[in-house]
C-alpha cells in the first residue's frame, strides 16, 4: 500500500514525485518470484501512463554462479558466466514483458566491496548510473552528474566498450 501510494503521489503542480523506480534483483538467487510479483502487481500497474519509469538491475553478477566464472584479476565475468548473465537478463526481460506488457532493458552489475585487504572494484556500475541518468527527466539529471565520483579508476570496468562516464557527463 505504501509503495502504491508513493508511486501515485504528486507535487502541488500535479507532477509525479517518483521519477524512476529502480528494482534491484539479487543475481546470486534463483528465486525471483517475489520480485516479479512486486513488479507485476504493484509497480507497473501504478506507474501511470509512463511505463519507462522502471529500471531493472541484477546485482551481484560476480556471485551469479556461486562465485564461479568471475575473473578477479580483470574484474569481469569469464565467457561462461557472461553467457549465464546475458541469459538471466533476457529471462527477466521476457518474464516482465509477458506479465505486464512493459519492455525493460535489465543490466547486470556488481557493486564492488572490500573484504579485509582485498577490494573488488565495481563492475558495470557506471552503466547502471548511465541508465539512471538516461531515464531521469532531463531537467533533473544535473543532480546526479554534479555528485559523481571523479576518480578515473571508478569508471573502467564495464561490459561494453562505451565510455559511460563521458555519456553521463554529456
Image (cartoon, rainbow, N blue to C red):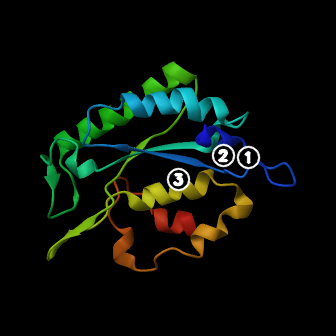
Looking at the figure, which quarter contains the C terminus?
A: bottom right
Q: Quadrant of the N terminus?
A: top right
From the viewer's perspective, is 125 left or right of 137? left
Does 116 sit left or right of 108 as displayed?
left
- Within 10 Å of disc 3 (Cα), the crowding (few <14, some 14-19, many 20+) is some
Residue lying at the far right in this picture: please name it.
Answer: 13
Query: Of circles 2 and 3, which is in front?
Result: 2
Q: Which secondary structure lies at badge 1?
A: loop
Instruction: Identify the element where label 3 is drawn.
Output: helix
Label 1 or label 3, whichever comes before in sequence order = 1
Residue 51 shown left or right of residue 105 in the figure? right
- Do tag 1 and tag 2 residues touch (Cβ < 8 Å)? yes
Q: Secondary structure at mark 2?
A: helix
Residue 9: mark: 1
Classify 69 as above or below 120: above
122 in relation to 12, above or below: below
Asked if labels 3 and 2 touch by Cβ distance under 8 angstroms, the answer is no
Please name the residue shown 27% across and 48% down the image: 61
Q: Say the numbered circle drawn on residue 30.
A: none
C-alpha separation, residue under disc 1 versus residue under disc 2: 5 Å
Count the labels in the image: 3
Examine the rendering and report whether any part of residue 170 can be seen. Answer: no
Residue located beneath label 2 in the image: 6
Which residue is at a point 71% across and 59% down the rendered structure image?
Answer: 138
Q: Residue at x 48, y 67 (%)?
A: 165
Asked if 26 appears above or below 43 in the picture, the reply is below
Mark 3, residue position = 131
Expressed as whole percent of the image width and height from the top left, the position of residue 139 reads: 74, 62
Dot placed on the residue nearer the N-terminal end, 2 or 3: 2
Amino acid at each position: 500500500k505504501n509503495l502504491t501510494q508513493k508511486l501515485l503521489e504528486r507535487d502541488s503542480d500535479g507532477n509525479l514525485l517518483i521519477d524512476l523506480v529502480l528494482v534491484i534483483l539479487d543475481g546470486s538467487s534463483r528465486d525471483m518470484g517475489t520480485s516479479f510479483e512486486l513488479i507485476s502487481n504493484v509497480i507497473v500497474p501504478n506507474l501511470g501512463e509512463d511505463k519507462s519509469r522502471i529500471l531493472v538491475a541484477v546485482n551481484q553478477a560476480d556471485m551469479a554462479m556461486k562465485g564461479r566464472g568471475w575473473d578477479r584479476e580483470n574484474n569481469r565475468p569469464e565467457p561462461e558466466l557472461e553467457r549465464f548473465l546475458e541469459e538471466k537478463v533476457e529471462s527477466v526481460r521476457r518474464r516482465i514483458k509477458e506479465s505486464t506488457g512493459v519492455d525493460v532493458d535489465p543490466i547486470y552489475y556488481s557493486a564492488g566491496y572490500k573484504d579485509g585487504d582485498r577490494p573488488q572494484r565495481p563492475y558495470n556500475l557506471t552503466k547502471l548510473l548511465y541508465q539512471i541518468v538516461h531515464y531521469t527527466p532531463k531537467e533533473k539529471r544535473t543532480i546526479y552528474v554534479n555528485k559523481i565520483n571523479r576518480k578515473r579508476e571508478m569508471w573502467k570496468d564495464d561490459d561494453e566498450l562505451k565510455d559511460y562516464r563521458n555519456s553521463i557527463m554529456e
